[in-house]
Amino acid sequence: MIGYVLSYVITALASLAALRRPLIGLYAYVGFAILRPQFIFRWAGDLSNLSLILGVALLAGWAINGFGKWEPGRSKPVVYALLTYTGCYIASASLAEFTDASFKAVLELLKIVLPFCVGLTMIKEEREWKTLLWVIVLAQGYVGFEQNLNYVRGYNTAADGFGGMDNNCFGVSLVTVFGAAVGLVLISRKWWERAAAGTAAALILHTTLLTFSRGAMIGLLVIGVTAFITLPKRPAYVAWILVAALVAVRLTGPQLLARYSTVVASSEERDGSAQSRLDLWADTLKVIATQPVLGVGPANWRLISYRYGWPPGKSAHSVWMETGAEVGVPGTLALLAFFGFAALRLWPLARKKVTSDNYYQVGASIGVILGAVGFITSGQFVSVVGLEAPYYIVLVGVIVIRDVHAHADEAAVSQVTAVTTGAAVVRTVSPTAPAAAARRPTRPKVASPGGTRLIPELGVRSQGRGA
């Protein structure tokens, strides 16, 4: 009951505040996108309109505030990759066979892209992107808490999925946010902040295992390897990685282990679910071969899957394969570049030596990289094109890239200005050779019988006798 009332209170207050300060609306909108109160408090009736109210207030506040300031800076490749993907998505929808389904999918994508643009143009300070990261992690952590609570009560609801997602889609969402939670633990300096971030990360990790998703498990393994590479090789960090690995192994029971082992099984030992994925991917490749540029249209693969012998509504069980079939190769590459460029741009910063000046940026970079590689990897095994959390995690990375390089450019300009100013001062103080010559006294000449000669006392020459 408290959560139900709190959802309405947050919606009302955040919607009003968003008209003046759109970021408040953005925090609430992103939190609800991950928390999905209409599923947690489903006994309270339909709460799906809460996100709509927040979204309208958010966009209205963005417009009232002049749409912010468009300054992607060094993060342009990431931002333009997302815009390119959106353009390909809309173009593909306009040519789709089933346009109603396609434009409904376009609307769902815009519900992600527009808030992303709001954050890009309105977030200006470090504390603002840190707040967004906290909202993402705590919202997913609370979902994990609810799933663990149900598990303790005797029913594993995570294995059935959450929020309209099946167990595999839910697993990908958890894996992506788990990477961000690790980054949040790194940038938390106060003990209670680190305890809150660590607790959320632990809940998310255990819930991921409870989903029984093989794709999510592979994503966790890739996150673990990436974390070992990127994290500073301090004893404390290495110890935490080992502890997390041991806990994950301990919580992986016989049923989970048997299911996960089919990922690397031979074709004779592979279960029907794993084999069907390979067959689905082969059929999506046939679609890509026939329509490589714009595909068959967003949300259209499931409507034509029966033509390839699958039940109507069958997903391709892969973000990348299904996107390729529906949006085409250019759109798929743009979406992959969105996540890939973010990780590549953040990699040098994540590998930097930690100082008091870059402490937060390094930790956030590691978190975004882990989230991105987790989504890219696990997304190969699950169709979750419209999942919100990965986009908002990359938004944090985009802002970090922009601000870090902007500050570096400003420092470089200041240094050049200082050097130029110093050189000008030196030129002003130090006389040049012509100026020195102009100030040197001239010795007058006088006539003498023997011609011109210098008279030392007067500094002049006199004329000698032979003149």
Image (cartoon, rainbow, N blue to C red):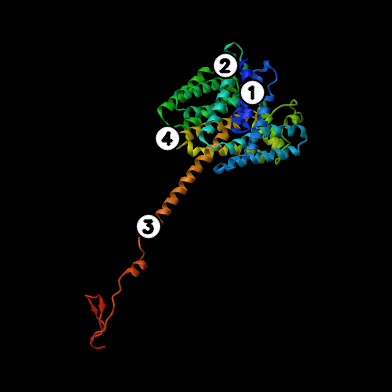
Q: Secondary structure at mark 2?
A: helix
Q: Percent position (x, y) of residue 57? A: 66, 31
Q: Which residue is mark 2?
A: 148
Q: Does label 4 or label 1 sit earlier along the sequence?
A: 1
Q: Find residue 113 and report its horizontal and vertical position in percent.
A: 64, 35
> Which amino acid is tagged 1?
Arg
Mark 3, residue position: 426
Of callouts 4 and 2, the N-terminal one = 2
> Of residues 401 and 296, which is closer to you in this image?
401
Q: Amino acid at mark 3?
A: Val
**Callout 2 amino acid:** Asn
Circle 4 packing at 10 Å, graded few (<14), some (14-19), many (20+), is few
Where residue 397 appears, as percent x and y from the top left, is 54, 35
Q: Secondary structure at mark 3?
A: helix
User: Which mark is in front, 3 or 4?
Assistant: 3
In the displayed structure, 408 sits above or below 383; it is: below
Q: Which residue is mark 4?
A: 356
Q: Going from the N terminus, do you reach mark 3 or mark 2 first?
A: 2
Quarter where residue 466 is shown: bottom left
Indicate which disc residue 36 carries.
1
The reply to whether residue 12 is visible in this rendering is yes
| Residue that lies at the very extreme toward the left in this rendered image | 457
Q: Residues within 10 Å of mark 2 (few under 14, many from 20)?
A: many
Q: Secondary structure at mark 4?
A: loop
Mark 3: few/some/many CA within 10 Å (<14, 14-19, 20+)? few
Inter-mark Cα distance, 1 to 2: 17 Å
Find numbered disc 1 in the image and state the secondary structure of the residue it sits on: loop
Residue name at image x 63 percent, y 29 percent:
16
Q: Quick check: marks 1 and 3 in contact, CB under 8 Å?
A: no
Q: Is residue 460 above or below residue 33?
A: below
- The span from disc 4 to disc 2 (Cα, nearest Å) is 37 Å
